[in-house]
Amino acid sequence: MDLPATSTETTGYLNSLYCESLSEFGRPRLLPECEGWILERRIPNASEFDAMGCYPMFACSDWSKLQVDLKSIGESLVSLSVVTDPFGEYDLHSLRDCFPEVASPFKEHFVVDLSHDPISFVHPHHRRNARKALQEMRVELCENPLAHLDDWVNLYATLIARHEIRGLTTFSRASFEKQLRVPGIVMVRAVRDAATLGILLWYRQNGRAYYHLGAYSPLGYDLKAASALFSFSLEYFAKQKIDWLNLGAGAGAGTSAESGLSRFKRGWSTGTKTAYFCGRVFAARKYEELARAGKASGTNYFPAYRAGEFS
């Protein structure tokens, strides 16, 4: 698929190659004024299309121009749903102008202000685990992430089996190959006796770094490779003059979701920032027809006619 070229300065989720890596889930579409990407999808049992933001969040270069792009869509799409970048330059009022149907707090993303010394905020338990783990392994920056594609795919298969992951985040090898080519990718690897114990993927973007995905071998879980990898990553990005890290949210839906992953990320963070779930209807009559046909009246899911799609 030939996509419109994006600026050589765009990296991470802003780059066209990232959206292209998700083309198994929809057709990439550029919003040209704000320079953000969405995925168009055919609606099941219908001839129409709707769209969603890319996983894990919608990012754009100029939030002030998002409304221009949305107005230009007309009724070519039935609806659009996105989860916003918590570091986006918007406020709730502007989001509700762009997404009059839904603009609500969705998840709290754990963030790190790297102007602070990690020793001042990283939980002592995490620091102890990192020190212990680093006695059992070494951590390295991977200069050529694609060289470790096989290791990454194998580790991610372990993650899928361990957590019974289904749906959008069961990425294919082809998708991962593209993700590892995206400008701004940073891969950090934990190794013991030439065996890969764990890998973290990050994207650098606009003076920040976003935690993308992480996966570990069974031995990596036992030896707490995650602690070693996060400790290394904080120190590395601080030296790279990165201002902020976005560690993402915990598992589960909603702002109050609590999990072991939430507790782990909280222990590395200096605070949180809110990601919003937003939805807009472009073709109101068709939206209502689809909702009625799918017997989706009364659901809080957006779009209503897709209720249960990821369950």
Image (cartoon, grey):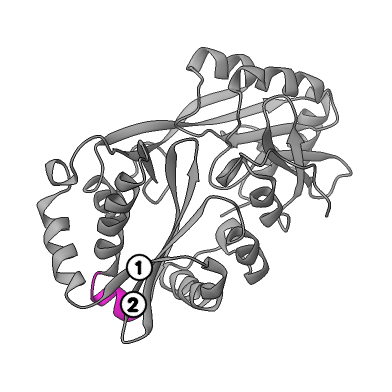
- x, y percentage for residue 178? 65, 61
- x, y percentage for residue 138? 27, 73
Q: Residue furthest right?
A: 47
The residue that label 1 is drawn on is 140
Cα gap from disc 2 to disc 1, whole angstroms? 8 Å
Specify whether 48 is left or right of 192: right
SS for callout 2: strand
Residue 232's disc is: none
- x, y percentage for residue 238? 30, 45
The residue that label 2 is drawn on is 191
Q: Does the magenta stretch include residue 250?
A: no
In magenta, the rendered stretch is 218-224
Q: Give me the residue at 58% from left, 44% from top.
A: 11
Q: Which of 283 and 116 is in front in this view?
A: 116
User: Which corner quadrant holds the N terminus?
Assistant: bottom right
Crowdedness near tag 1: few (<14), some (14–19) or many (≥20) residues, C-alpha within 10 Å: some
Q: Give me the residue at 12% from left, 41% from top.
A: 120
Q: Is residue 281 in view? A: yes
Rendered position, 44 above or below 161: above
Rendered position, 255 above or below 46: above
Residue 220 occupies which quadrant of the picture?
A: bottom left
Residue 301 occupies which quadrant of the picture?
A: top right
Crowdedness near tag 2: few (<14), some (14–19) or many (≥20) residues, C-alpha within 10 Å: some
Specify whether 260 is left or right of 164: left
Q: Counting residues from the N terminus, which is met first, the one under dot 2 or under dot 1?
A: 1
Question: Is there a contact, CB below 8 Å, between mark 2 and mark 1?
Answer: yes
Q: Give me the residue at 41% from left, 49% from top.
A: 252
Q: Is residue 222 magenta?
A: yes
Q: Is residue 296 in view? A: no
Rendered position, 150 above or below 73: below
